[in-house]
Amino acid sequence: MMYANPTAAVSYRSDSAAGQEAYALRFTALVLISAIVLQRIGIFSGTSYLSVVGPVGLLLAAYGVMQSGLAISRGRMMIFIALLTWIMIGSAIQAAYPNSFGTATSWMSLVEFIALSSFGLLVFSEPVDERKFFRLVNAIFMALAIAGLVQFVVQFAGVSLFSFKSFVPANMLLEGPFNTVIPIGTSHYMKSNGLFLVEPSVFSQFMALAIIIEILMFRRILFVGAFAAALLSSLSGTGWLMILGFVLTASFSLGIRGLILSFVTAAVGFLAIAALAVFFPPWFQFFLDRTGEFSQIGSSGHFRFVTPWLLANYVLAREPWVALYGLGAGVSEHLAMAPNWAYIINPPVKIALEFGIPGFVLYLLFLLTARRTSTQKALLVPTLVLLLLDGGNSMFPPVLFPALLLIMIADLRPSNAD
């Protein structure tokens, strides 16, 4: 008997539930592996780049729908149409009354936003056993953790595996726009970037997801230890923010069990940091010093987490109507400000400034609309931290696609379900 799926549209042809589950797991593996292995590959020119993971993921999605392994969520489709309608209204107003920052709407940026966000319209045609799904996910993350740890360790023997510049053409390598190779403090040793990933911060984010999944589902000591060691080798704080989000909110989705798992996760984090303090005191001090970056102008923490809100204040103070229908797609990244100053923009600020606060509310509703198991509910907050606060991941498919897969696309059934 088919398991009812109220969020999915009727597939184009009928396949067995077992066959659809097998396809969903293959799709999961292909999305995660391509997002990891191909993360630094794309087309790079000047300040613009296109990750090859975007087209690969969208082709996998189209094939999946045609093969009936994937379907379209009716609820998310309605919200997506409402979001696009609001964007078009704002674009029409912008065309009639241009903004005062001297930057016009980028239609290419709008097409990219629509194409990448449409990945979230997908849903498995048949629910997949959640233990099978998360076992596969963490097997892939374990391979990534091992790669990152090997990369980190062999540098002590004089082997550097941190950059692809020696064998990937410059115009196909996405290391330029990112901080791929970062020294640890003033030492000549480097933070691990997971061998394949664009930054140590992305490595830390994937390892944080792996730790949370492992503690929620399997609690294998060897796996938790390996993921924690890999997280430490990145010496990046963004993954720790995701873990903090999980610790603070798990009890709301899992009750007493969530409270216990939050305590276990906090204990794992404490032990990992304690090990860093005991065995690598200078690096522990470097890690500790980074907690003060939020107030240090020019630091990575200030640049990533503070400047977006300063930018929002700057724009809204000059043109308050932006809060209603926005500046237009792509405008927030190329503002002509006087005096000009460097900034980075995160998804909440970017979407709110470009499409208005109603546009951001619709986008957030789009992310929240899904049927989730208790495990996925516990993953929701850390994944939203990843998508909305840990960088520009809403437009970076190697991070966006795995995140949407975990909390939206994967329609799972609890392992004890009949």
Image (cartoon, rainbow, N blue to C red):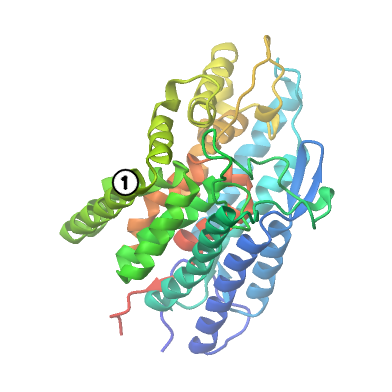
Give the side of residue 208 with respect to residue 266, left or right.
Answer: right
Say which element carries label 1: helix
* Residue 328 rendering spot, x and y as whole percentages: 68, 31
**Residue carrying label 1:** 278
- On screen, 220 above or below 229? below
- Residue, x 65% and y 34% (percent of image)? 89
The image quadrant where one finds the C terminus is bottom left
Q: Residue 150: x percent and y percent?
A: 54, 62
Q: Position of residue 216 (x, y in %)?
A: 31, 64
Q: Residue at x 73, y 41 (%)?
A: 176
* Picture layout, residue 410 above or below residue 308: below
Q: Which of 242/361 is in front?
A: 242
Write the residue at 68% across / 10% down: 338
Whether residue 372 is visible to the viewer of this picture, yes or no, is: no
Q: Is residue 285 above or below residue 64?
A: above
Taking depth in this image into account, of 113 and 152 the one nearest to the observer is: 152
Q: Nearer the viewer, residue 234 or 251?
A: 234
Q: Going by the picture, which residue comes out furthest to the left? A: 256
The relative height of residue 222 versus residue 397 in the rendered view (above or below) is below
Outermost top residue: 339
Residue drawn at 61 percent across, 52 percent down: 117
Query: Are there few (<14), some (14-19), or many (20+) residues within 10 Å of tag 1?
Result: few
Q: Is residue 2 left or right of residue 178?
A: left
* Residue 133: quadrant of the picture: bottom left
Instruction: Give whichever of 347, 284 is nearer the camera.
Output: 284
Amino acid at pointer 1: Val
Report the residue that reaches farthest toward the front. Answer: 157
Tally the marks. Answer: 1
Q: Position of residue 270 (x, y in %)?
A: 27, 48
Q: Image quadrant for the N terminus?
A: bottom left
Q: Can residue 297 be seen from the camera position used here?
A: yes
